Image: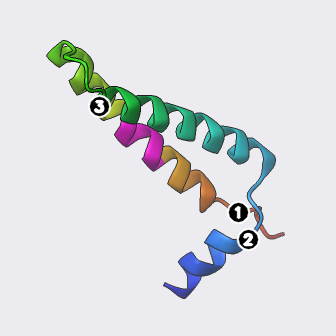
Amino acid sequence: MKDLKKRWSTKTPTFWKKVQKIGIIAGTIGGIIVASPVALPALLVSASGYLLLAGTVTATLSQLTVEPVD
């Protein structure tokens, strides 16, 4: 747990920050579609659930990525 805490607070590399932003955007779009009060086709709601999951996992894992130590 100490290692995870350390990784979470260290600086994220530039490439992974971009990946993180894409994950946040994907998760937000998926969450908006899932929580939409309008009746949508089941396929769209199901796909947006996967988009929400993929976005949150991508954003979280990219936050834990750190610069390699030489």
Q: Nearer the viewer, residue 31 or 23?
A: 31
Q: Residues within 10 Å of mark 2 (few under 14, many from 20)?
A: few
The image quadrant of residue 12 is: bottom right
As drawn, the residue found furthest toward the left would be 42
Q: Is residue 18 above or below residue 45?
A: below
The image quadrant of residue 5 is: bottom right
The residue identified by callout 3 is 34
Q: Residues within 10 Å of mark 3 (few under 14, many from 20)?
A: some
> Please, what is the dominant secondary structure of the magenta stretch?
helix
Q: Amino acid at mark 3?
A: Val
Identify the coloring. Answer: rainbow
- Highlighted range, magenta: 52-57
Of the image marks 1 and 2, the number of the one nearer the N terminus: 2
The residue identified by callout 2 is 10
Q: Secondary structure at mark 2?
A: loop
Q: Amino acid at mark 1?
A: Val
> Residue 8 placed where, x, y %?
62, 70
As drawn, the residue found furthest toward the right would be 70
Residue 28 located within the stretch drawn in magenta: no
Q: Is residue 59 left or right of residue 51?
A: right
Instruction: Work out how far the residue at label 3 is from the one at label 1, CA to CA, in angstroms.
Output: 32 Å
Instruction: Work out how far the residue at label 1 is from the one at label 2, CA to CA, in angstroms.
Output: 7 Å
Q: Residues within 10 Å of mark 1 (few under 14, many from 20)?
A: some
Q: Is residue 52 left or right of residue 17?
A: left
Q: Quick one: quadrant of the C terminus?
A: bottom right
> Residue 32 placed where, x, y %?
39, 31
Q: Is residue 60 left or right of residue 51?
A: right
Q: Amino acid at mark 2?
A: Thr
As drawn, the residue found furthest toward the bottom would be 2
